[in-house]
Image: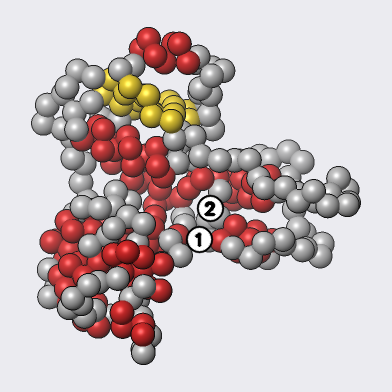
């Protein structure tokens, strides 16, 4: 029903709202026609991991939806995640190993969303790809920054398994520049992709910042994620029996809110 509300816009502004340039009117039309196979193809044409964005993206496409001028916008994000979840449930998402190999070797530093997308595209193009992650499991922000209540780690794990089946190699617990040096990487690989993300928080230089009990989100969230996955976390920051103030009301602030509750 929601997909059927998508109009045949002369100029679909949802494209401009989407950072990936997803072909939203096309897969909406295909869902409306119950052609789920082709809808999956059009969704994957611009997005390696729609099950991630369908859960986590703030959906600027819906803000840009023309229907939203005088009615509620099409629930594009819900349609997106419905396409990919239905495909996973019906086992229509399968590994796509390359038909031939180029003989080129590529190192991808970082296994967050950008590193994973780059690695998948490069592997499918026929290159031999190694992904290096300094944490103990691949996924980066998706594993240790996004709380379990927002995206279950099983959603991440099944996609990483697909990438392994395609031929992508993952090396966890390896810190580029420390465990393996830059000259070593240059010697072993024909190209290097830097997808290290940003784990440096934005600080507030205000009086009292140095007092105890004040923490950056990226100190708090990874610990909680590890604990929820069953890992032992020494000196864990916890909100138990405390009053909590969160500075910042974006996605990260919301993650801290849900985690604290």
Query: Residue at label 2?
Result: 146
Residue at x-position 59% and y-position 57%: 252
Q: Residue visible at 45% across and 41% down?
A: 112
- Left or right, 260 with reference to 125: right
**Front position in the image: 192 or 66:** 66
Q: Is residue 145 left or right of residue 192?
A: right
Vertical arrangement, residue 130 with respect to residue 203, above or below: above
Quadrant into which the C terminus falls: bottom right
**CB under 8 Å between callouts 2 and 1?**
yes
Rendering coords of residue 3 (x, y %): 24, 77
Residue, disc 1: 150
Judge the density around disc 2: few (<14), some (14-19), many (≥20) Cα neighbours within 10 Å.
many
Circle 2: element type: loop
> Which residue is at the front of the view, 80 or 157?
80
Q: Residue at x 43, y 61 (%)?
A: 57
Q: Judge by depth and name the residue closer to the eye, 194 or 136.
A: 194
Q: Quadrant of the N terminus?
A: bottom left
Disc 2/disc 1 C-alpha distance (Å): 7 Å
Q: Quadrant of residue 21?
A: bottom left
Image coordinates of residue 194 in percent, x first then y, are 43, 30
Compared to 40, does 181 lie above or below?
above
Residue at x-position 19% and y-position 18%: 103
């Amino acid at each position: 029903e929601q997909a059927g509300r998508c109009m045949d816009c002369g100029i679909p502004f949802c494209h401009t709202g989407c950072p990936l340039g997803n072909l939203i009117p096309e897969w909406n039309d295909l869902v409306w026609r119950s052609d789920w196979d082709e809808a999956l193809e059009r969704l994957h044409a611009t997005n390696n991991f729609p099950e991630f964005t369908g859960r986590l993206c703030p959906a600027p496409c819906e803000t840009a939806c023309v229907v939203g001028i005088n009615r509620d916008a099409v629930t594009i994000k819900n349609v997106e995640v419905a396409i990919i979840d239905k495909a996973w449930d019906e086992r229509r998402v399968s590994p796509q190993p390359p038909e031939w190999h180029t003989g080129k070797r590529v190192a991808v530093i970082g296994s967050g969303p950008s590193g994973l997308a780059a690695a998948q595209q490069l592997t499918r193009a026929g290159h031999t790809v190694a992904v290096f992650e300094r944490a103990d499991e691949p996924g980066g922000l998706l594993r240790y920054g996004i709380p379990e209540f927002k995206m279950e780690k099983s959603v991440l794990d099944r996609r990483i398994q697909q990438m392994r089946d395609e031929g992508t190699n993952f090396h966890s617990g390896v810190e580029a520049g420390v465990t393996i040096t830059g000259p070593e990487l240059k010697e072993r690989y024909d190209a290097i992709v830097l997808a290290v993300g940003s784990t440096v928080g934005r600080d507030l230089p205000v009086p009292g910042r140095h007092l105890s009990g004040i923490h950056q989100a990226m100190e708090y969230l990874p610990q909680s994620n590890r604990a929820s996955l069953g890992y032992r976390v020494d000196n864990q920051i916890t909100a138990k029996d405390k009053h909590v103030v969160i500075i910042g009301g974006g996605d990260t602030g919301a993650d801290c809110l849900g985690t604290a509750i």
